[in-house]
Amino acid sequence: MIVDDPTAHRSRWHWRTLDNAAGGLALDLGLYAVSATFAAITAVTSTLLPHRAWGAVAAVGYLLATLTVIAQLLLRRRSPTSRLTGLPARWAVTGLAWATTTLLPLAWQSIDRAGGRTDRAQEEVLVVEQAGSRLLEHGTPYLGPDAIAALPPGEQLMGYTPYQPGMAMFGLPRALLDTWWTDSRVWFAVGTALALALAVAALRGAPATTGEATAGQATTAATHRRDAALLRGVQAATVLPICALTLATGGDDLPVLALCLLALAFAAADRPGRAGLAVGLAGALKLFAWPVALVLIVWGLTRRAGTRVAVGAIGLPIAALLPALLVDRDALTENVLRFPLGHGLVTSPAQSPFPGYLIASALPAGRLIAAGLLVAAGVAIAVRLARRPPRTAVATALICGYGLLAAIALMPSTRFGYLLYPLALLTWAPALRRPSDTPTAAIADERTGRTTSA
């Protein structure tokens, strides 16, 4: 990572101290204990029935993980070098937590839904599966404005598909066969797991830089820190309640997030072409990936690889849009542009009380003011990219994370669930550091104008 000011390392000291306490187990304990509390409260108080069902199962899974970590902490006091308290054991607990707090409730709700329960999926699951059926039958996942207007007023919202065309692919299995394992959430989970596995493999297999082979114990320690940061990043994308709940009950955001994390992992491994393909796949699913694609292209330009990134980052979303554009241009425009911008036949129900929503709903011309603030934030990020383009994957992830956080806060229509993007991206950033990227080397490269790989 390029360091503009050595004091930046001091500012991260307190976080590293907390993250490394008891070999990482202290923060693991806090994560699982707080998550168990959140899941229990959700099971009792949520007004959304799929969320309540998730909470009832996930609370037990988080509790099991909490008790396991407590046992690890006790064992560590007696035997600090025990393999049962090391990093591989922490990975195993994370896998167990994801299985019991995400995959188990997901499968349970899918089976219940296949058996006739109508309260075991959020609306986006139905929307994606309907989009898959339309794609199979008509060549486009979208209904035109006339077709939506012809629906009963209470069903018009469900007529919209506010995603990019690629999202309909997750609905195709249900269009072909009506059973529990064709539920779109099952395939969201498969896509998410595959992308995260590839990301972990890309980071662990990143090639060493010149001189790294002679770094000895320092490199081994740096590799261990990288692997610990990688575990924390995977936890943020899997067992963090905002991600576990989303995947188990709705799920469409998780494969998008996982592909963005994969793109950043390829960037850290100095594979710009693959980074472009990964973020391009994410952009073919949902608009949330497009800002990440833009920042990655700027990163690619600093390495004289902007074209290689852009081919996939821009080419794949365009390729996904073209068939829908040729089949029914009005339908594409109504679903992908008018509805998200608040100009559809019905209004989006995304109304979490972030600043943008509060301004839009409480002030005269509030929607215009919120839109102006959003544009101003975008301009500020563009100026930052132009003046100080990200030269490392770490810097790219941080810009994406903070940028999406600002956008979510200022959008007139948004959801709390969208916070999973900035939270996961910011937690992922430390895992993108190469073991050879020591502060001294990074500062030296900054002074000489060279680029240091993240």
Image: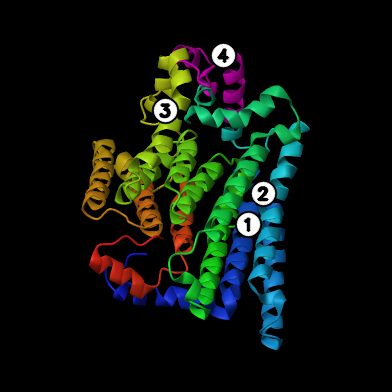
Q: Are marks 1 and 2 in contact (CB under 8 Å)?
A: yes
- Disc 3 to disc 4, how far (Cα)? 20 Å
**Three-letter amino acid code at disc 2?**
Trp
| Image spot of residue 171 (x, y percent) | 62, 29
For the residues labelled 2 and 3, the Cα–Cα distance comes to: 36 Å
Amino acid type at mark 4: His
Label 4 sits on a secondary structure element that is helix
* Magenta segment: 126-155
Where residue 138 is drawn, which disc sits there? 4
Name the one closer to the observer, 444 or 5: 444
Q: Residues within 10 Å of mark 2 (few under 14, many from 20)?
A: many
The magenta stretch spans residue 368: no
Viewer-nearest of labels 4 and 1?
4
Residue 134 in the magenta stretch? The answer is yes
Which residue is rendered at x = 66% and y = 49% of the image? 54
Residue 275 visible at all: yes
Q: Position of residue 403 (x, y in %)?
A: 34, 50
Residue holding disc 2: 54
- SS at mark 3 in the image: helix
Residue depth check, mark 2 versus mark 3: number of the one nearer the observer? 3
Mark 2 or mark 4: name the one nearer the start of the chain.
Answer: 2
Could you give the CA–CA distance between mark 4 and mark 1, rounded to whole angstroms?
41 Å
Residue at image point 62% right, 65% down: 32
Contact between marks 3 and 4 (CB within 8 A): the answer is: no
Determine whether 241 is above or below 412 in the image: below
Q: Earlier in the sequence, mark 4 or mark 1?
A: 1
Q: Position of residue 425 (x, y in %)?
A: 45, 54
Comparing labels 3 and 4, the label whose residue is closer to the camera:
3
Q: Which residue is mark 3?
A: 318
Q: Which residue is mark 1?
A: 39
Q: Is residue 117 visible?
A: no
